[in-house]
Image (cartoon, rainbow, N blue to C red):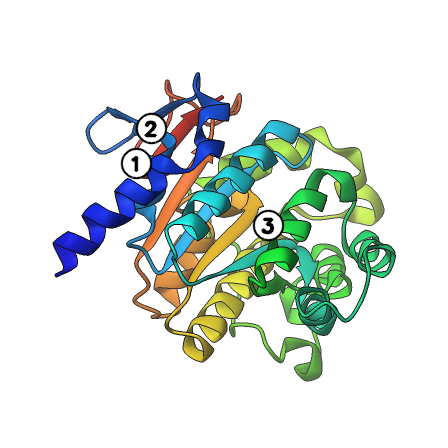
Amino acid sequence: MLGCFRTLFVAVLIAVCCAQAHGHTIITRLSDGQTLSLPQLAAAAATSQVILVGESHEESYHHELQLDLLRLLDGGKLPMAIGLEMMQSDSQKVLDDWVEGNIGEPEMQQVFERNWTGWQMYRDIFLFAKEKRIPMVALNVPLAIVRKVSRDGFAALTPEERKGLPPGTSCDLANPQVAFLRKTFRSAPHHQQNGGKFDFFCEAQTVRNSGMALNILRYRDKEPGRTLVVLTGVWHAVKYAIPDQLQRLGGGIASTVILPETPYLNSSNSGTSEADYLVEL
């Protein structure tokens, strides 16, 4: 029965016309170097409980890829929800109201822009979710907490501020991501203002990863029948970021990581320790 379902699922996906928009996209399965079509990628990812689709926030074609994947998954009748780095967890009710049609675009855009920038980059994804009544999940840690950790360290958080966060968050210096974070810290002077310390900066990024991982697990506990498609920056989607935190929190989550190529993560320096699939657009 499962084999018949998968065959039907693939057939439905192949029939979805939006995949033709990326006819020149090269998708590589990193485990064996096999090249896949976009419908094949969606069909393979659909077997996971969590699908992380990385992005460079300012690249419009990364968001087009995300939307095409969402359309393919929806066309295959996969029960799903969309998890968003762009929205802080305390904005969840607004997302619920948006999907239910209780608020219009101007109000949604206003709330989005209090959380993030670049509404036009994400607008079509939000409209698609509303049209299809696909739940949207605010995953990110409130910005005030991230800023406090970046300035003063995780230890400075009050018990109230630590509610909803995994305990004992620290900068794991064995993490391959740390080398990139060091480069980012050195290249951005604003990170070092007011005596900023790298360990605090690293803890702040870890708070984002661990906080989003915890929110993913909470949603999965509440809605185990839905696959959560997580849209987030590549350095949160990469396997040693949110997926690593999912394992540390003991979720036992089967996840798939899909990353677009970037100057820092590409076919020459990435493998299965970074992602499951690499997309060259």
Q: Amino acid at mark 2?
A: Ser
In the image, is residue 50 above or below residue 216?
Answer: above
Name the residue located 52 percent from the left edge and 25 percent from the top edge.
Answer: 262
Give x and y (percent) for residue 49. 35, 60
The residue at which mark 1 appears reads as 40
The residue at which mark 2 appears reads as 37
Q: Alpha carbon of mark 3 to alpha carbon of mark 2: how far?
A: 37 Å
Give x and y (percent) for residue 261. 47, 25
The answer to whether residue 266 is left or right of residue 64 is: left
The answer to whether residue 78 is left or right of residue 263 is: left
Q: Earlier in the sequence, mark 1 or mark 3?
A: 1
In the image, is residue 35 above or below residue 223?
Answer: above
Contact check, label 3 and label 2, Cβ < 8 Å: no
Other residues around mark 1 within 10 Å, as few (<14) / some (14–19) / many (≥20): some
Other residues around mark 2 within 10 Å, as few (<14) / some (14–19) / many (≥20): some
Name the residue located 28 percent from the left edge and 31 percent from the top edge.
Answer: 29
- For residue 26, which quarter of the picture? top left
Which is in the foreground here, disc 1 or disc 3?
1
Name the residue located 51 percent from the left edge and 72 percent from the top edge.
Answer: 166
In the image, is residue 168 above or below residue 108?
Answer: below
Regarding residue 39, the answer to whether it shows in the image is yes
Which residue occupies the foreground of this view, 89 or 48? 48
Name the residue located 30 percent from the left edge and 58 percent from the top edge.
Answer: 254
Q: Alpha carbon of mark 2 to alpha carbon of mark 1: how far?
A: 5 Å
Q: Earlier in the sequence, mark 3 or mark 2?
A: 2
The residue at which mark 3 appears reads as 202
Q: Amino acid at mark 1?
A: Gln
Which residue occupies the foreground of this view, 92 or 10? 10
Other residues around mark 3 within 10 Å, as few (<14) / some (14–19) / many (≥20): many
Per the image, label 3 sits on a secondary structure element best described as helix
Contact check, label 2 and label 1, Cβ < 8 Å: yes
Q: Amino acid at mark 3?
A: Cys
